[in-house]
Amino acid sequence: MSVEIKVPALGESVTEATVAKWLVKAGDSVTVDQPLCELETDKVTVEVNASVAGTIADLAVEEGASVQVGGVLCHIEAGAGGAAAAPKPAAAPTVPAAPKPAAPAPVAAPAPAGANLAASGPAARKLADEKGVPAAAIQPSGKDGRATKEDVLAALASVPAPSAAAAKPAVPAGPRSRADREERVRMTRLRRTIANRLKEAQNTAAMLTTFNEVDMTNVMALRERLKEDFEKKHGARLGFMSFFVKACIAGLKELPSVNAEIEGDELVYKNYYDIGVAVGTPQGLVVPVLRDADVLDFAGIEKGIGELGRKARDGKLSIADLTGGTFTISNGGVYGSLMSTPILNPPQSGILGMHKIQQRPMVVGGEIKARPMMYLAMSYDHRIIDGREAVLFLVRVKECIEDPERLLLGV
């Protein structure tokens, strides 16, 4: 008996994926729950498993092909070992459904007045991406704000040609002179999503960056003194990130606009603190979210960040891990960066950039001393956050790090 293996449900707003890698080939014997292929979505990589034991009859799609949710991936000729198992119409999803936070998912269009491209058909999305038509310019005629291909064509006619083309990279007019010494690799879905979202942040937000520097002497001394006891008691390493998460939350509570976002013509102030922590992986940058970080102690933060980091490196992050953050922290210092200007993670209005700790001569008490200093960068959406608030937020973070007792006493 031939059993169809289909693309499982991939989470809210995700309607298609790319077959990143086949783990089997036609003729292979497989067992129940054996991984068959890896699907790459805009957010995560998902394994699809065999629902029955048997032999792979054929692979319906090739690596690199796009597939719709519910589409057939392959057929398994069920063997004796799989006859007792009831065939399932679709492989069980390995990713839990995304939660429904008050904030829209990061991949959603920032302006609800336009089309819901994330939920629209693939033809409409593809045409909008190719022509560089922003969602806000599309007047959807489909159900639930979904755009049709005709809606995109109508919007394209009203968009000046230079604007529509500006979002696309330049295409070579002719043969490349040194093509024999070049290699072309198709962008992964995750890399395309990263590129689109970063460009979206630049095009949508009035982004500005303010800088400060922080003396890490006291935090480093505290960490050095207590790190062994901390690890013995809590089973987690005491890093610097927990101090910065706590410091940022203190600043967010004092300056609510930094924890807000724009939705249509309204400002949404969030009374919860879901902190995104940027993590570099071989596949690209991802930003898993530490939920309700304000109610976690230092051990809870360190354990949470450690677990999210491991899941990111192993490709095991779920859609729920990546949606709904209210503020982001990016630590370029782990790679040796001395200074940078981080880009916002839409629809968030602020992001803190940490950098390398470096000994620099500083004037302390009228004397020049070598101190471990770190540059901090705060990028923010000037539509929501005034310069005064951005500077005060960064100063608040600096105060909490330079005098960590403030974090313990809440002052």
Image (tube, rainbow, N blue to C red):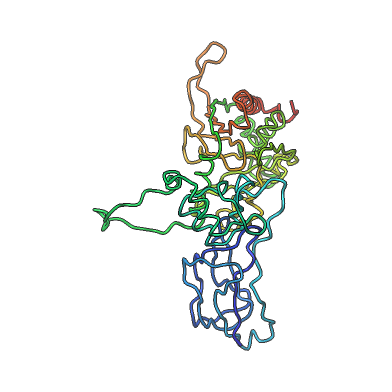
Rendered position, 300 above or below 153: above
Rendered position, 25 above or below 303: below
Q: Is residue 405 visible?
A: yes
Q: Nearer the viewer, residue 306 or 108?
A: 108
Q: Quadrant of the N terminus?
A: bottom right
Rendered position, 170 above or below 390: below
Q: Position of residue 113 (x, y in %)?
A: 63, 46
* Residue projecting furthest to the top: 366
Left or right: residue 153 versus residue 263 is: left
Instruction: Give me the residue at 65% from left, 33% from top.
Output: 258
Q: Position of residue 107 (x, y in %)?
A: 59, 50
Q: Quadrant of the C terminus?
A: top right
Counting the numbered discs, the total is 0
Residue 181 image-quadrant placement = bottom left
Q: Nearer the viewer, residue 68 or 166?
A: 166
Q: Nearer the viewer, residue 158 or 295?
A: 158
Q: Nearer the viewer, residue 60 or 129?
A: 129
Q: Position of residue 218 (x, y in %)?
A: 62, 27
Q: Is residue 218 visible?
A: no
Q: Position of residue 165 (x, y in %)?
A: 42, 47
Residue 224 image-quadrant placement = top right
Instruction: Give me the residue at 54% from left, 10% from top.
Output: 366
